Amino acid sequence: MYLKTATTKSTNSYWDSRKTGHSLKQAAAMMKRADAVVIGAGAGLSASAGFTYSGKRFHDNFADFIEAYGFEDMYSAGFYPFATLEEYWAYWSRYIYINRYQNAPKSVYGDLYNLVRDKDYFVLTTNVDHCFQKARFDKQRLFYTQGDYGLWQCSKPCHDKTYDNEATVKRMVAEQKNMRIPSELIPHCPVCGAPMAMNLRADHTFVEDDGWHMAAERYQDFIRRHKNSKILYLELGVGSNTPAIIKYPFWQMTAENPNATYICINYEEAICPQEIKKQAICIDGDIGTVLKQYFICVVQKNV
């Protein structure tokens, strides 16, 4: 297992155009030579695309909840023990709507798609906002490990099935008043009658449905088929909260394959272990800016 104490942080500040420009040319060359690309995406990618959970976006959509409860950000407010399900779903329906059914404010995901669309690619992500599919990524090449804002499950759960929530969520948003939805819109399990819950990995009750398992198998099959090939592991916006899902496996698979390349683009967290230093390119900077102004441009120019 690689430890953070054994890592090398990029010395190429994004704003050091001479050094970072060289790194981006190297990254573009590795993309061009790659037989396959595995994208590992964390919260930093969606943040770069404009899906922020505090500040103006939070205040614009939750001013009444902020005034009533003093909430400071969208994420932590989601754990508040609301007194009624009517109020709980008033909050969560807005949360789901703006983070799942509205498009990202910036074109970061579209730029990323343009970068890999002609490659044999697969996406492994801890994000739950559906941005990859909205940016035209092939659903059969996506594995959302931690769930989906667009799915509900039984809160117990009494069975391993998930349910699309789009129509009901949009009604909740449209029909809520005074921070409450109509009682008849409260979702209940169609099997046991228990309240429904979000299909998000928070504890042992998370439902891994048939779609989850099929996506997991497609990902493992992709890794098996390209085990010894010229594979590029492109890590974007992955922090230290859940490194065992993307970061550590990417490091390990790079170390085991001399033909592999590991590229990490992240703001202030672009690191790699010493063991793969010669196979790695770490770029410290805003992902969207790097992709748009450098990475894609360099590839399009066939550098």
Image: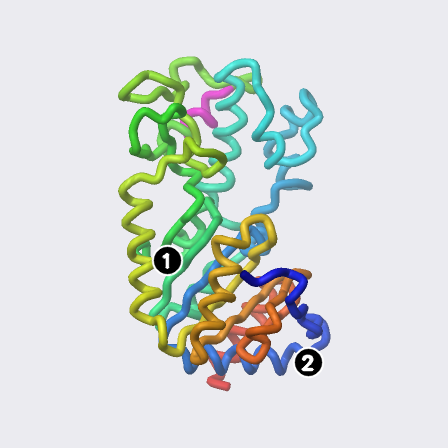
Residue type, mark 2 in image: Lys
Q: Is residue 76 magenta?
A: no
Residue sitting at x 49%, y 57%:
246
- Give the magenta-colored segment's residue range: 170-176
Q: Which of 256/85 is in front?
A: 256
Residue sitting at x 45%, y 51%:
131
Q: Is residue 173 magenta?
A: yes
Mark nearer the viewer, 2 or 1: 2
Residue 268, percent from left and from top:
68, 61
Residue type, mark 1 in image: Arg
Residue 189, percent from left and from top:
33, 22
* Residue behind mark 1: 136
* Relative to 47, 89 lies left or right: left
Q: Can you say whether 190 is above or below 276 in the image?
A: above
2 or 1: tag closer to the N-terminus? 2
Residue 73, percent from left and from top:
65, 36
Residue 275, quarter of the rendered image? bottom right
* Residue behind mark 2: 19
Residue sitting at x 36%, y 26%:
157
Please state, as top left, top right, bottom left or bottom right, where the N terminus lies in the image.
bottom right
Residue 138, quarter of the rendered image? bottom left
Residue 108 appears in the picture as rendered: no
Helix, strand or loop under label 2: helix
Q: Residues within 10 Å of mark 1 (few under 14, many from 20)?
A: few
